[in-house]
Structures are given as C-alpha cells and as structure tokens.
Image: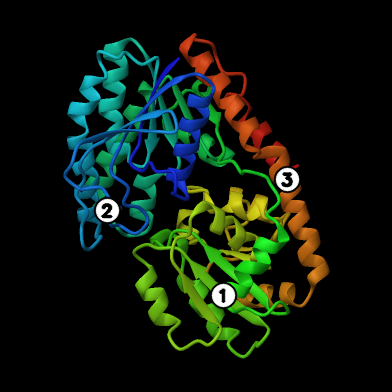
Amino acid sequence: MKILMYCLNYAPELTGIGKYTTEQAEWLAGRGHEVRVIAAPPYYPAWKIGDGYRAWQYRREHIHGVDVWRTPIWIPAHRSGLLRLLHLASFALSSLPVLARQLWWRPDVVFMVEPPLMCAPAGTLLSRCCGSKAWLHIQDYEVDAAFALGMLRRPWLRWLAMRFERFLLKQQDRVSSVSPPMVALAIKKGSHPSRAILLPNWAVLHDTPAESAAAMRDELGIPRDTVLVLYAGNMGAKQGLEQLSAAAALLRDQADIHFVFCGDGAGRPELEAACAGRARVQFLPVQDTERFQALLAAADIHLLPQRADVSDLVMPSKLTGMLASGRPVVATAVPGSALADVVDRCGVVVAPGDVQAFAQAITVLAADPAQRTALGMAGQAWAQRHLERDVVLTRFEQSLRAVRANIKDGASADTCGGALESWRS
C-alpha cells in the first residue's frame, strides 16, 4: 500500500506528537508498505531548526525506510496567537508544491495529522484528485485549545474556524483521535460515526535495566534515598507549568524530595525563573531516546499538570511513557475526563489549579514506597492491555486496509462508549 503522511513534525529523536508519527511511518515501512512523509525540518520542541537543516530549504531524505520530503517553515522569535498562525501557514504554503508532486505517485491513503488543521484542505484535495482515501488524525483540537487558552479571541474568527473544521471533518474517509472523548467530539463536530475510530498513543513496553536508571540518578547527583519527582515533556501553554513551580515552592523544605524538569518549549524560561534559587530543582534539555527511557525509570513519581480549560481537547502524549515506566503519576485533571479516568488507576488526580492538593499528593506518595510500587505496576499493566505499540499499530494497519477497500471499520466510534468503558477496565 502507498501511504502519504502529511504532518508538521517528523524526526526519530522527537518525543510527543512527532515521535508517534515517526514510529508509525517506520513501522509501516518495515511491514512492506511504501511510505512517504511531507514535513517541516526538525525544530520542535525547542523552536529552533535542527543541526544540519535550514528553515528555507527543500530537502529529500531517506530515514529508516521512509521517504521524507522536507519543506520550508518560518519560526517566529515570539509565539503570539497571530504569529503561530503565520508559522503554520508558512508550512502549509511551502508544502503545496511537494504535495502536488505526489499526484504522479498516487498514494492509496493520505494520512494528515492535526495540528496543524491548516494543512488538511490541500491533503484532502490531493486524495480526491488521486482517487485515494483521506484520513485526518487529531492529536490535539488546536482550534478549541487556542481559544480556550486565550491565544485567539475574536468571536468571528472562532465562528469561521469552527465551520471550516466541521466542513473538513465531513470530507474525511476516516477520522481518528487519541481518546474516546476526543473521538466523540469529532463526531459532534461533524464526522460520521462509522468513519471515526480510536487510535491511541502507544507505549513501547520494555524494562529499562536498573543499572541504567541508577546511573542516571548518579549522573544527576541525586542520592538513592531521595525521591525523584519528574516532569518530562513539552513546556508549552496548555501544560499548566505554573503548578510545577508552585509545588516546588511549597515543598522546598522537604529535603528528601528532588524535582527534575526535563524538556523545552515556550514556557521553559518562565518556569526556570520561578524556580530560580531552589536547591532541589534541576532542569534538563530534551533527551535522546535511550537517556529519556533511563530518566523515566530513574523517577519515583511522574508529574502531569494540565489546565482545566483544555480538558478532553488534548490527551497528553507524555502519559504513555510514564505508564510504561511503571511509576505512579500525579496529574491535575477534570474529574471524568479521559486523563482522569486513566490516572485514577495508576496515581493521584487533583483539580487543576489546586496547588496545595498537588503538593500534598506528592508528599503522600513520597512517604509510601509500597503505594508507589502498586500504582506503578497497575499503570504498566493497563498500558500493556491498551497501549502496547505493536497491538495499536496492527489495528491501525488493518484500518488502513479497510478504508482503502471502503469497508466500515469494526472499531468505529459507533462503539465509542464501549471503548471508553474498555479504557476504564
């Protein structure tokens, strides 16, 4: 099968959304499919073009069996709502010539990843011109999130964006998203139930050697009898990073608790400033895959803050790695949201913005190694049932074959309620 993946971020060393797209493409290529990817040069999450690449350069490369076409993108120095739109528009426009070249290749499926939704019209048009199938995968509802976070404000712009989104969803042969509530929202926004499916972020389930985790702690200078509390992931607007600095401030006198904040993004400078002078708060840059796995395993508690106003508009991709590591999670989430439903079985959920409860949950888990072990094992077992990579991607491959053959997917969102119940099991 010929599969064209149209996405913003693609690189083997990425975490988050880009990591999943990369693993999808390489996995499919390894199964004998012809896979092409149209993407920007690597720049995320640091918002800086990666070494060996140029922002305004077209480039074609082959990475682990995948044919990757890079197109130019403009990276703003500051990231207001308008500048983000221009940033996405630069990729949407620069990728059009490369997208048009795929007419001669004639892919069977055009797989588009949101964000950015801005690229979906051209990708959908290409699929129609080729007689192929259009598939939109929603990692984040970027339009809703942009207005919820105040990045975009004008009512007329929201009205226009929502109708644009609804029109696009109706044109897709398949729509997928990463949690049952997000699939249900796609249906509410206009996708036909028989065309909407659950495609969760997956986890690579393996045991990181204990010596690797111990070596990471030694490298960071964290004593073995100290509780390592870790946040590892993107540092952006929807993460609620202020809750991390507030918790660190409340627990500043707890000599047995050490915080490590790992990642990059627009919110990192402000977080660093808020934590300046804290003796047991440490910052790390984005890590490569091997070191990242060791860091996750070295932690005793994972932190997953999220703002209330983006509940069920996003499902944090970083959660899968936390579950796979077999460590408990302390999350801020709205009760009944997909994130709360998952974390309830493997950690502690508190209300977003309640920093006292957030800090208290960390303190309670730090003092109870047995509970940490039990919750970590429960989360790892749940991930094994629902998120194991080969299981998820095999279902994805089956759905690709089904959509090409005009077969309704057996895991359609007609059974979205059942899928949610399955996640709760």
Residue sticking out furthest to the right = 370
Q: Which mark is residue 337?
A: none
Cβ–Cβ under 8 Å for marks 1 and 3: no
- Mark 2: secondary structure: loop
The quarter holding residue 5 reads top left
Q: What residue appears at the point 71 percent right and 37 percent down from the top-left corner?
A: 422
- The percent coordinates of residue 286 (x first, y second) are 44, 61
Residue pointed to by mark 3? 382
**Between disc 3 and disc 2, whose residue precedes?**
2
Of 312 and 60, which appears nearest the observer?
60
Q: What residue appears at the point 59 percent right and 41 percent down from the top-left corner?
A: 202
Distance CA(mark 2)–CA(mark 1): 28 Å
What amino acid does circle 1 point to? Leu
Residue pointed to by mark 2? 49
Residue pointed to by mark 1? 220
193 displayed left or right of 331 = left
- Which corner quadrant holds the N terminus? top left
- Mark 3: secondary structure: helix
The quarter holding residue 11 reads top left
Of 255 and 363, which appears nearest the observer?
255
- The percent coordinates of residue 240 (x first, y second) are 46, 66
Label 2: few (<14), some (14–19) or many (≥20) C-alpha neighbours in 10 Å = some
187 displayed left or right of 69 = right
